Image (cartoon, grey):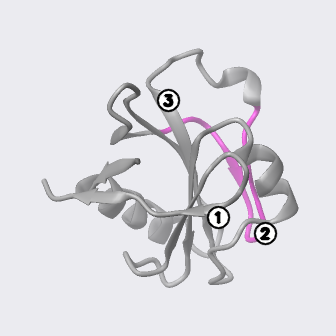
Amino acid sequence: MWSIKKSVLLNALKSAENYYPDEFMCFLGGQKKENIIDEIVFLPTSTTIDSATINETIIPFDESILGSLHSHPNGYATPSLADKKFFTKYNLNLIFGYPFTLTNINFFNAKSEKIKINLIED
């Protein structure tokens, strides 16, 4: 089972608010053996109200990048067809829906199946 530090989620939520009304996208880093997410990995992205994209050739080959995270300004924290395709690259994927709060987040595996994760207080 995956775990994520609460501070990571709160910082990512703040970033999503700053990008609103556009989507926000980043990556999740952490400790692979323990399945713990403990950092946000920011890379250059292009964002609009309807999408967030990244040139995948700039994603470093770094085993500490364990997942993806992006926001949906429309409020629906469910994956689109494009999201589902992208999710296959990572074992953990998060979507924040507007309004960006800890209660409007969904977590998905690489098959786009909704999963539960542990929240670590820090």
Q: Nearer the viewer, residue 55 or 115?
A: 115
Residue at image position (37%, 25%) is 33
The residue indicated by pointer 1 is: 23
Q: Nearer the viewer, residue 12 or 46?
A: 12
Q: Nearer the viewer, mark 3 or mark 1?
A: 3
Report helix, strand or loop for mark 1: loop
Gap in Å between the C-alphas at discs 3 and 1?
Answer: 20 Å
Q: Position of residue 26 (x, y in %)?
A: 54, 46
Report helix, strand or loop for mark 3: strand
Q: Looking at this rendering, what residue extends furthest in the top direction? A: 61
Mark drawn on residue 65: 3
Q: Are marks 2 and 3 in contact (CB under 8 Å)?
A: no
Q: Position of residue 44 (x, y in %)?
A: 61, 37
Report helix, strand or loop for mark 2: loop
Residue 29 lies in the magenta-colored region = no
The residue indicated by pointer 2 is: 50
Q: Which region of the structure is painted magenta? A: 42-55
Gap in Å between the C-alphas at discs 2 and 3?
Answer: 25 Å
Q: Which mark is first along the chain, 1 or 2? A: 1
Magenta segment's dominant SS is loop
Tell me the quarter of the picture where residue 82 sits.
bottom right
Q: Nearer the viewer, mark 2 or mark 3?
A: 3
- Three-letter code for the amino acid on which mark 2 is drawn: Asp
